[in-house]
Image (cartoon, rainbow, N blue to C red):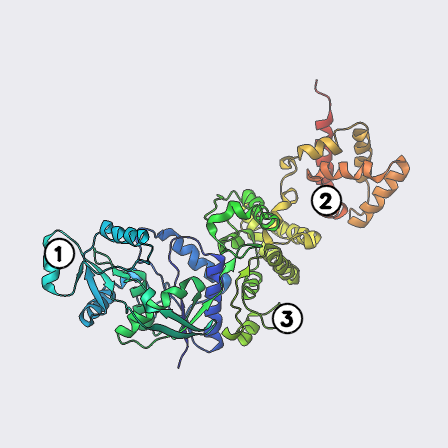
Amino acid sequence: MTVRTRFAPSPTGYLHIGGARTALFNWLFARRHGGQFLLRIDDTDAERNIQETLQPILDGFRWLGLDWDEGPEVDGPYAPYYQSQRGDRYRAAIDRLLASGAAYRDYATTDEIQAERETAQREKRRFLYSRRWMAETEAQAAAFEAEGRRAFVRLKMPREGVCAFHDLVRGDVEFEWALEQDHVVQRADGTCLYHLASAVDDHDFEITHVIRAIEHLSNTPRQMFIATALGYALPAFAHLPYVAEPGSAEKLSKRKLNKYLKHHEFKKIHDHGVDIAAALGLEISPETFNPVVVDFYREVGFEPDALVNYLLLLGWSLDDRTETFTREQMVEHFSLERVNRSAASFDPQKLLAFQERRMQALSLDERVARTRPFLERASLVDTPPTDAQRSRLGQVVAAAGERLKVAGDILSYPEFFQADAQVAYDEKAFNKRVRKDGVEPLLRRFRDRLANIEPFDAQTLDRTMHQFVDTEGIGIGQIIHAVRVAVTGKAVGFGLFEGLSILGREACLERIDCTLECLKPEA
């Protein structure tokens, strides 16, 4: 048997962290067993779907390195892979279900169903549809239609016995048939709903293993009922624990951003990303720029391997020691038997730790390659950069070192890529470090030192600074902070002397001159 797994996103929003984890487990299982991984688009609910969100989902998979063997933009022998294009197959299945008695036409109105529900509630009993408006013959259907009624198609679920199956994660599972409602599988307009479409597609695409989130567990009996009624072989089922909120057992949701921002580490990673997005001029919204969404990490410059490695450990473990895996190791070791049953809490701090390790493991050339697109998008360097800009970028990346936690952090150092006149002062830092008594003459005299030192490198600059404070009889703090603000516009950054040497003598002198000009009293 060739293993075939699938992931079936609905294009109703950007790719969720939990969805990406589910897709990863499907991809790993297929690759581990030499099988195929399919991408299917569940777009049966046309009113909810946002077509423009499909491309970010596909782009997100490609960025994560989760290639699919069949599906959108790849095609395959079972095309089309969009449910919206498979209506004929679903209608044929509906006809077979009706003919076998496994489904029926129902002419009840919404108000009539609601009335039965409210009666059950008043009588303190579980609601179970009476099938009062069920049409099992053409004559019954014609009589209802003569009243102006329109038919839905419902499954005629068993009213006794159990649905039992073995779940590859959760073990033996049972559902009482009597607790199942007669689920609608076709609307009055002839369009089909999720349960039927999913069962038909899994059969048509020869899916052998349905690996999905735990919230779909309750869907399994009705899909098994459909498949059995249609004479389909059943796939194996595995239901993964959901990804939980930071520090909570509740399911992680894109819609709870405001709640999560009260969590310190979540807010920290969110605000970190917002700073990068602001430097790029990106639109920031909870739907598209949110640490619960995969696109967030791509936009701010995370390493895809870092995110994938972290997702692997959300509900799976090899042992108590190993946390870092290559893709090859993930495929080699992955098994559903090692998937936990309990929910795994999303930990932003741990994710950032994975990212930092991956970033620092990159060579200097690799880090330059990662950071360059951010400078280009921010128009801080040319596209492509000049040789001088490339050289400057390499110097800044090397000097920043571990300060570059994600590739987008390069935008924290615009002063190294801007023209001297474009460098903006942090007003608070300028007032605290520069605009105070005694600083202006010190800056002038230190500027004169810079004009004459040779060579203009970090070591010589460091030595010059210490000689200067000794000569002046001052503490180093009285001048070094003022120099940093004068040259970079900021109070913080990587090593000052490295920064001065990268900028070069001419730029440093020009920027100090601009600062001194700002300190002149107004005429």
Rendered location of residue 151, percent (x, y): 18, 57
Amino acid at the residue labelled 2: Gly
Mark 1 Cα shell of 10 Å, populated few (<14), some (14-19), many (≥20): some
Q: CA distance from mark 1 to mark 2?
A: 87 Å
Per the image, the residue denoted by label 2 is 504
Residue contact between numbered discs 3 and 2, judged by CB atoms under 8 Å: no
Rendered location of residue 398, percent (x, y): 69, 54
Secondary structure under the numbered disc 3 in the rendered image: loop
Rendered location of residue 319, percent (x, y): 61, 73
Amino acid at the residue labelled 1: Phe
The image quarter in which residue 483 lies: top right
Instruction: Determine if residue 289 is in view.
Output: no
Q: Nearer the viewer, mark 1 or mark 3?
A: 1
Is 498 on the left or on the right of 355, as rendered? right
Secondary structure under the numbered disc 1 in the rendered image: helix
| Residue farthest to the front, as pictured | 123
| Residue farthest to the bottom, as pictured | 1
Mark 1 vs 2, N-terminal side: 1
Disc number placed over residue 103 in the picture, else none: none
Secondary structure under the numbered disc 2 in the rendered image: loop
Is 241 on the left or on the right of 128, as rendered? right
Per the image, the residue denoted by label 1 is 144
Mark 3 vs 2, N-terminal side: 3
Mark 1 vs 3, N-terminal side: 1
Disc number placed over residue 320 in the picture, else none: 3
Image position of 160 with respect to 411: above or below:
below
Instruction: Determine if residue 34 is in view.
Output: yes
